[in-house]
Image (cartoon, grey):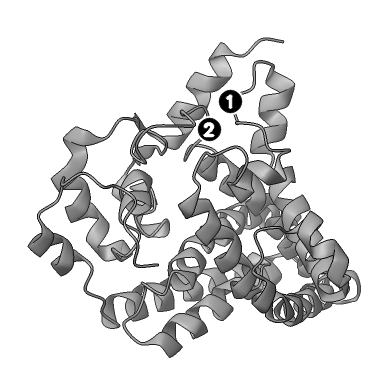
Amino acid sequence: MNEAFEHRSLVDRTLLRALQQRQDLPSIIRLTLHLSAFLLCAYGVLLVTPYSHVAAGLLSIVLSGIWASLFAPFHECTHQTAFKSAWLNSLGAWLSGFPFGMAPAVYRAFHFDHHRYTQYADKDPELLFLGGQPVSWPTRWKNWLLMISGWGLIQFKTGALVRFPFLAYEKWEAFAPWAPLDQRPTLAWQSGVIALFWAGLIIAAGIGPAGMGWVLFAGLLSHMFQAIWVTTEHTGLPNEGSILARTRTMQTWPFFSWWLWNMNFHAEHHAWPAVPWYGLPALHQEVSEHLDATEHGYARFQFKVWSKVGV
């Protein structure tokens, strides 16, 4: 996506062009380390399960956090900004898309419309999925728990994997109005491939080594970690105004920024989505004084929200 959604001249054009330059090496290193950590942690769960279910359970929680963060390279690769080489972006999208549980073409179509219509209740696919209503922070703790449980993410992913491969032509518009007509066959077959992978994973959890159950548990739990992260991006923000007013940037520790591929700089990403993840910190330094919504720490921010909700 090469469009810019912040139309004020907040960044020098020469600097912006420099920040938009794409490279292969940074993402090759980052994705290799990221996927290696994921696979090693999953193997560790399988390894320790026969000896200690307590250790397996604790390690599966760590695995779930790493699993949730795979959304970051998946997101970056579907934007085609992670790598300079198109084929590496495609490969990265598939390698992270299998464990994430969504076809690259599905997320690309859904997410690009989200960029174009961020927070517009009648057009943003994220809001359409929630009934076309602007999303505010829950006023009851039960609703807040449901929001950060990741249940909505599981519903969306499962719906796409189960329905897209078999969805009748006349039902596409009602179920996925954001899906371009000419891309629907691609969305269907890619979803079928991801669905087969997950079906195999579920079967393996049932008949394979005992540790596979803990691995599957980590996959489910990862949606909670992802929800804690992604609900901070737009929830409670205006449905009009500049893109910087409609998107929130989170200040967090470098450790978490590493796993999130700098997606905590979310307002900057929404304003200038052609800037790769490795250019976002410099972009943040350039526009930080113009950001309308910033918070410090994911857990701290969610606790602040929780402290204000009622019974």
Circles 2 and 1, Cβ within 8 Å, touching? The answer is yes
Question: How would you rate the neighbour count of disc 1 (Cα within 10 Å): few for under 14, some for 14-19, many for 20 or more?
Answer: few
User: Compared with residue 277, is residue 296 higher up or lower down, i.e. above or below?
Assistant: above
Left or right of 224 in this view: 19: left
Tell me the residue at 35%/79% (across/down): 83
Q: Position of residue 269 (x, y in %)?
A: 35, 53
Mark sitting earlier along the chain (2/1): 1
User: Compared with residue 295, is residue 276 higher up or lower down, i.e. above or below?
Assistant: below
- For disc 2, the marked residue is 235
Question: Which quadrant of the figure has residue 52?
Answer: bottom right
Q: Position of residue 252 (x, y in %)?
A: 34, 41
Tell me the residue at 26%/47% (across/down): 7
Front residue of this view, candidates 137 and 105: 105
Left or right of 50 in this view: 254: left
Tell me the residue at 55%/73% (across/down): 96
- For disc 1, the marked residue is 136
- Secondary structure beneath label 2: loop
- Secondary structure beneath label 1: loop
Say which amino acid is labelled 2. Answer: Thr
